[in-house]
Image: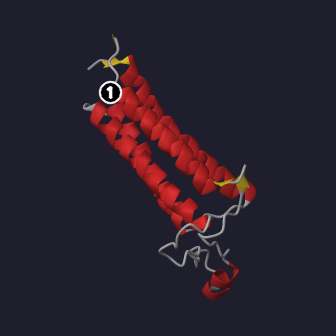
Amino acid sequence: MTLNLSERLARATALLVPLALLAGAYLSQYGFGLHPCEMCWWQRYAHFAALALALLAFALPKQRTFVALAAIAIAASAAIGGFHAGVEYGWWQGFTTCTAPASGSGGGDPLKAILQAPLVRCDVAPWSLAGVSLAGWNFLFSLAGALAVALLLTRKGSTAS
């Protein structure tokens, strides 16, 4: 099956957008100590799904279907990010208590692990750039990525192998 240039660009974008955003999320977590809250994880889950679907688009037939599903997953992360940003900015109330889950792994004292776990609230932006939180940036980049993939899938172009 040959894909036209727009379809190939859509497939690449569907792979690169969640890959880049997840890389940024993990860099902020492990490089800069910005631990994710519960809604941050929800955004990541949508990107994990998009990444898996985009990889399937490279490996299986019906590539357009997997690319379109990846775009939907990226758009879902944008929706969650937009909601999360609204909670951070105080525009509306979030659904959860939004604390980081404590891990009792490692064979240590589970109570000590709970007490030392970082408390991460969903309604407080731990970092922002130009007044936009990480959730807000995820909303903007994910929305742009999902729209780009969708537009590329609707374009007609010359076929290439």
> For residue 36, which quarter of the picture?
bottom right
Residue at the disc numbered 1: 154
User: Could you tell me which residue is drawn at 51 percent across and 56 percent down?
Assistant: 82
Q: How many marks?
A: 1
Q: Report x, y in % for residue 58.
A: 37, 31
> For residue 29, which quarter of the picture?
bottom right
Between residues 108 and 26, which one lies in front from this camera angle?
A: 26
Q: Report x, y in % for residue 136.
A: 59, 53
Q: Is residue 24 above or below residue 157?
A: below
Q: Tell me if I can see residue 155 in this picture.
A: yes
Between residues 87 and 112, which one lies in front from this camera angle?
A: 87
User: Could you tell me which residue is drawn at 46 percent across and 52 percent down?
Assistant: 77
Is 126 on the left-hand or right-hand side of 70? Answer: right
Q: Report x, y in % for residue 86.
A: 55, 62
- Looking at the figure, which quarter contains the N terminus? top left
Task: Residue lying at the far front in this picture: please name it.
Answer: 91
Q: Residues within 10 Å of mark 1 (few under 14, many from 20)?
A: few
| Secondary structure category for the residue under label 1 | helix
Q: Is residue 14 above or below residue 23?
A: above
Is 124 on the left-hand or right-hand side of 51? Answer: right
- Looking at the figure, which quarter contains the C terminus? top left
User: Could you tell me which residue is drawn at 57 percent across and 41 percent down?
Assistant: 20
Q: Amino acid at mark 1?
A: Thr
Q: Is residue 57 above or below residue 89?
A: above
- The figure's colour scheme reads secondary structure
Is 5 on the left-hand or right-hand side of 130? Answer: left
Q: Report x, y in % for residue 105.
A: 58, 75
> For residue 8, which quarter of the picture?
top left
Is 152 on the left-hand or right-hand side of 2? Answer: right
Q: Tell me if I can see residue 18 in this picture.
A: no
Between residues 48 and 40, which one lies in front from this camera angle?
A: 40
Between residues 113 and 140, which one lies in front from this camera angle?
A: 140
